[in-house]
Amino acid sequence: MIAEALTVTAGGFLSSAHCIGMCGGFAGAIGAARASFWPLFARQLVYNLGRVFTYAFLGALAGSAGLYLSRFTVLGVSPQQLLALVAGVLMIAIGLATLGVIRLPQRWAGAAGAFMAPFFSYFLSARGWWGYFAAGLANGFLPCGLVYAFLALAAASGDADRGAIVMTGFGLGTIPAMLLVGCGARFLSNVTRQRIFRFAAAFVLLLGGLTIYRGWPTRPAACCEGQGAVRVAG
């Protein structure tokens, strides 16, 4: 279980450049206040821990749903295999979109961001650490294709605890990139940023391909067991 968590955390870290584009604006809003480095770092850390808490909660729900669905099969394909395939397809689509190969509709993401912004602003206006933590909790519910892909992996685990571990690992892996943006380290040139995004996109494509390979119905039955689909990157 520890190895699985570390694998997913590495996946979150290597693909976290995508999170900068999706959620970097919220982290930047926290970092907009003038403060010395360490108080700002603490605020960003509390905010991101709230985001990870939401991910863990959603992962537990997804794992429980996967456990319920595990009793059904469709044309000989188990739900764990199907969810792994869905996760892989989502990852590949995100990777190709990041590289500019395809274009994904942005209307839903924009509408969701506009919907969440008032809640985010409300929590940030609260005094004390709770406001930053609650803002992170709200941000965790923001629709994101990469989050959906890892939620599919959490569901494929077929277990609430494992699902929570999958999403906790993913969330922890994205924290370094979010801290970098939130603490105002915007000294990176556009060329450097583009290289980072391309690297993240390439990793997401690779992870998506491995996820599909491990979940493909012609694979041995081991991938159909509750914990097999979580080991997509191992």
Image: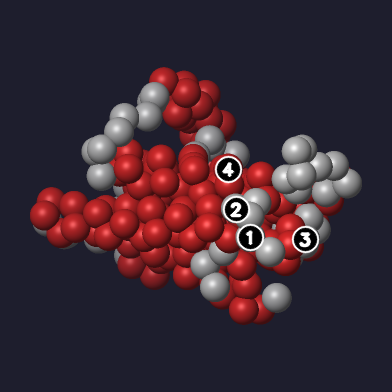
Spatial CA span between label 2 and label 3? 15 Å
Q: Residue at x 38, y 26 (%)?
A: 106
Quadrant housing the C terminus: bottom right
- Rendered location of residue 82, percent (x, y): 66, 45
The kind of residue on which mark 4 rests is Val
Q: Residues within 10 Å of mark 3 (few under 14, many from 20)?
A: many
Query: Where does label 1 land, which residue?
Result: 219
Which numbered circle lies on residue 86? 4
- Rendered location of residue 78, percent (x, y): 75, 48
Query: Where does label 3 land, which residue?
Result: 226
Judging from the image, what secondary structure is the residue with disc 3 in?
loop
Q: Residue at x 47, y 23 (%)?
A: 108
**For discs 2 and 4, the disc positioned in front in the rendered view:** 2
Which numbered circle lies on residue 206? none
Q: Residues within 10 Å of mark 4 (few under 14, many from 20)?
A: some
Q: Residue at x 49, y 42 (%)?
A: 90
Q: Earlier in the sequence, mark 3 or mark 4?
A: 4
Task: State the residue in front, 29 or 144.
Answer: 144
Judging from the image, what secondary structure is the residue with disc 4 in?
helix
Spatial CA span between label 2 and label 4? 11 Å
Which numbered circle lies on residue 216? 2
Q: Please identify the quarter of the rendering in which residue 191 is found.
A: bottom left
Judging from the image, what secondary structure is the residue with disc 1 in?
loop
Task: State the residue in front, 188 or 9.
Answer: 9
The kind of residue on which mark 1 rests is Arg
Dot 1 and dot 2 residues touching (CB under 8 Å): yes
